Amino acid sequence: MPDLLNECRLVSHIYEYQEVTSTMDVAESIIKDKGIDSNFVVVAETQTKGRGRKGNHWDSNRGGLWLTLGLFNYSFAPSLMLYTGLMMRRTLFHLLNIDEIFIKWPNDILIGDKKCCGIIANQNSQARYHLIGIGLNTNNDVSNINENYKAISLAEITGKPISNKQVLKTFLDFFFSSIGIFQTDSLGPFIDEFNNFHLLNNKFIEIENKTSYKGLCIGIQEDGGLVLKDASNNEIVVYSGTIKSFL
């Protein structure tokens, strides 16, 4: 995708591979071995050990868009993963023009009730990098993915092949067009948009971290915390965990 560099000038390198363990592994090696000091993208056709959240495996067979975005010398609030999810939601709405594209706190994108995208993020503070890993089902076969995940691909929805290059370009355009606002004001300017498309809002959820929380989800805070109202009408703010159920 060399010409993509000319179209997205805030990315200095795009590294393309046929097969990797994970694009996050490659990105970490690039930072360590090449000593670069600019934004970059790693893209692979397949991942043999694609990373999901909390060490889960992400199925990454051929056809999907598997990438890691390396961001150099930014200072971000902890809600970077949520900002990324919102920019991916904008991307998919722009390309598909359907309303039922939802963000599920903290890191999933769903179309209807089926998952099409997962996002992870970590920070290498010593190298001054943030890394964002994105797995998006575009043209890949999702029929063999564990049925508990209810996966779907973009090609299933459109009935025709999806250009991974177009998806990546559109995502980078949206991501970098608002990154300065996010860096300055965190999620504040994006709260209403996020909550409008948040799958968990107004649902009774159970979330598990070191302990279990139950309550009605009333949205997210500027810092990315998930706000619940418990049975006693007390507000609980949760910053990490796994959604076990929602109704």
Image (cartoon, rainbow, N blue to C red):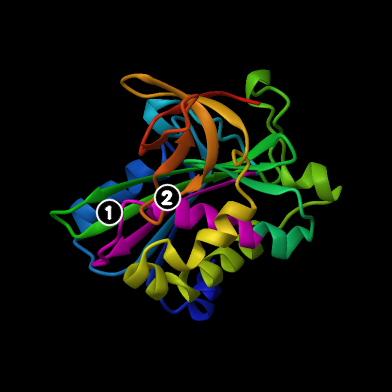
Q: Which residues are magenta?
A: 64-91
Percent position (x, y) of residue 152?
72, 36
- The quadrant of the rendering that contains the N terminus is bottom right
Q: Is residue 16 visible?
A: no
In this view, the residue in front, 175 or 156, is: 175
User: In which quadrant of the rendered view does residue 99 lie?
Assistant: bottom right
Q: Is residue 155 visible?
A: yes
* Picture residue at 75% right of the left edge, 40% below the top: 112
User: In which quadrant of the rendered view does residue 41 lie?
Assistant: bottom left
Percent position (x, y) of residue 169?
58, 67
Q: Which three-letter amino acid code belongs to the residue tagged 1?
A: Ile
Whether 228 is drawn above or below 213: the answer is: below
Percent position (x, y) of residue 229?
48, 34
Q: Locate residue 209 relative to residue 155 in the image: left or right.
A: left
User: In which quadrant of the rendered view does residue 179 lie?
Assistant: bottom left
Circle 1 residue:
30
Instruction: Please report contact status of discs 2 and 1: CB closer than 8 Å, yes or no.
Output: no
In this view, the residue in front, 95 or 181, is: 181
Name the secondary structure under disc 1: helix
Q: Locate residue 151 relative to residue 244 in the image: left or right.
A: right
Q: Locate residue 139 relative to residue 83 in the image: left or right.
A: right
Residue 143 image label: none
Circle 2 residue:
81
